[in-house]
Image (cartoon, grey):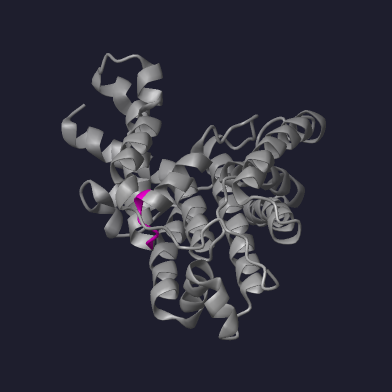
């Protein structure tokens, strides 16, 4: 296999692997801009993967699966909102607890509900080739011969960039995440803004989990996200809370992940355990090198109550 073929296959894998990550990271971007951090992104994706597969089985279609995946992620976001906004729980602590909760619930439901019904998996998403563009060397097969959700994920990047930088919605979200007290005095409903941002994050993370299950193995396995949600969380920081920055970070992490899948094909004799930890190692190095220069939203992870 020539180096050109290897690079093409590496990019094809990276884009496919990175799509679930991209959905989750874009959802987290919107939420963090509004001041709400979601450590439970891993749990949201896990719920999305489980309910996505179950929904695809129930409805007999992939679209129904993705709707259920979004609802699964939104359900966990709703719990996070109740704990943090209503009962004033610490957002980080709530996220950790909900990750454990999601892992336990999906493992239980897998053995009691899903395994006996979806024993043969579900229909996979088919690839859609964009005529002309898919024949561009190297990047053509990577970006223009993928399933529909890859295109949706890539399209979301400029849409969210435009929303955050060019619309009033973006200004309201930033105001809620930077100075909620000042924004409230200007007539902005901080509670409603943060609820909507949180639910949007849950839906997108759920879709990311659904993509992981339905475009990958076509089935749900216990703890199948295996840390993807945490990498998505890091991608938001590495991307400096900007939509295109998040896309760049996701591609870097996904390429590292894809490399460990493709390394055998070019005869790299490195223990697979080392290659498997490569994306997480890059995540740690990236955060260690850039964390001091990061400037998160000023009110990130702080609960706001006007009466305080």
Which residue shows up at 50% across the image and 53% down it?
23
Asked whether residue 144 appears in the rendered view, the answer is no
Left/right placement of residue 89 relative to residue 225 reads right
Q: Quadrant of the C terminus?
A: bottom right
Which residue shows up at 37% across the image and 58% down it?
295
Q: Is residue 127 above or below residue 122?
A: below
* Residue 191 placement (x, y as % from top left): 66, 71
Q: Quadrant of the N terminus?
A: top left
Left/right placement of residue 232 relative to residue 137 reads right
Asked whether residue 302 appears in the rendered view, the answer is yes
Which residue shows up at 63% across the image and 66% down it?
304
Dominant secondary structure of the magenta stretch?
loop
Q: Foreground: 186 or 171?
A: 186
Q: Is residue 240 magenta?
A: yes
Q: Residue 99's quadrant in the figure?
A: top right
Q: Is residue 59 above or below residue 16?
A: below
């Amino acid at each position: 296999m020539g180096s050109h073929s290897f690079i093409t296959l590496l990019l094809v894998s990276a884009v496919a692997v990175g799509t679930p990550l991209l959905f989750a990271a874009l959802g987290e971007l919107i939420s963090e801009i509004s001041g709400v951090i979601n450590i439970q992104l891993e749990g949201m994706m896990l719920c999305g993967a489980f309910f996505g597969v179950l929904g695809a089985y129930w409805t007999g279609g992939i679209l129904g699966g993705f709707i259920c995946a979004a609802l699964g992620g939104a359900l966990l976001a709703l719990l996070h909102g109740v704990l943090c906004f209503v009962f004033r729980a610490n957002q980080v602590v709530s996220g950790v607890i909900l990750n454990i909760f999601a892992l336990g619930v999906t493992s239980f439901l897998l053995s009691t509900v899903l395994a006996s019904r979806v024993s043969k998996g579900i229909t996979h998403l088919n690839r859609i080739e964009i005529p002309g563009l898919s024949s561009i060397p190297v990047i053509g097969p990577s970006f223009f011969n993928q399933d529909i959700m890859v295109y949706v994920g890539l399209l979301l990047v400029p849409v969210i960039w435009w929303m955050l930088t060019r619309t009033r919605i973006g200004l309201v979200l930033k105001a809620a995440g930077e100075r909620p007290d000042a924004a409230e005095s200007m007539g902005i409903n901080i509670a409603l803004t943060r609820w909507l941002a949180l639910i949007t994050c849950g839906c997108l993370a759920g879709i990311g989990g659904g993509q992981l299950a339905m475009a990958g193995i076509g089935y749900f396995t216990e703890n199948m996200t295996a840390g993807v949600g945490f990498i998505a969380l890091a991608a938001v920081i590495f991307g400096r809370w900007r939509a295109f920055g998040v896309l760049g970070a996701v591609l870097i992490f996904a390429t590292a992940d894809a490399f460990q899948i493709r390394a055998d094909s070019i005869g790299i004799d490195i223990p697979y355990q080392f290659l498997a930890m490569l994306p997480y190692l890059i995540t740690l190095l990236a955060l260690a090198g850039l964390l001091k220069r990061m400037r998160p939203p000023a009110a990130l992870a702080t609960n706001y109550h006007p009466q305080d």
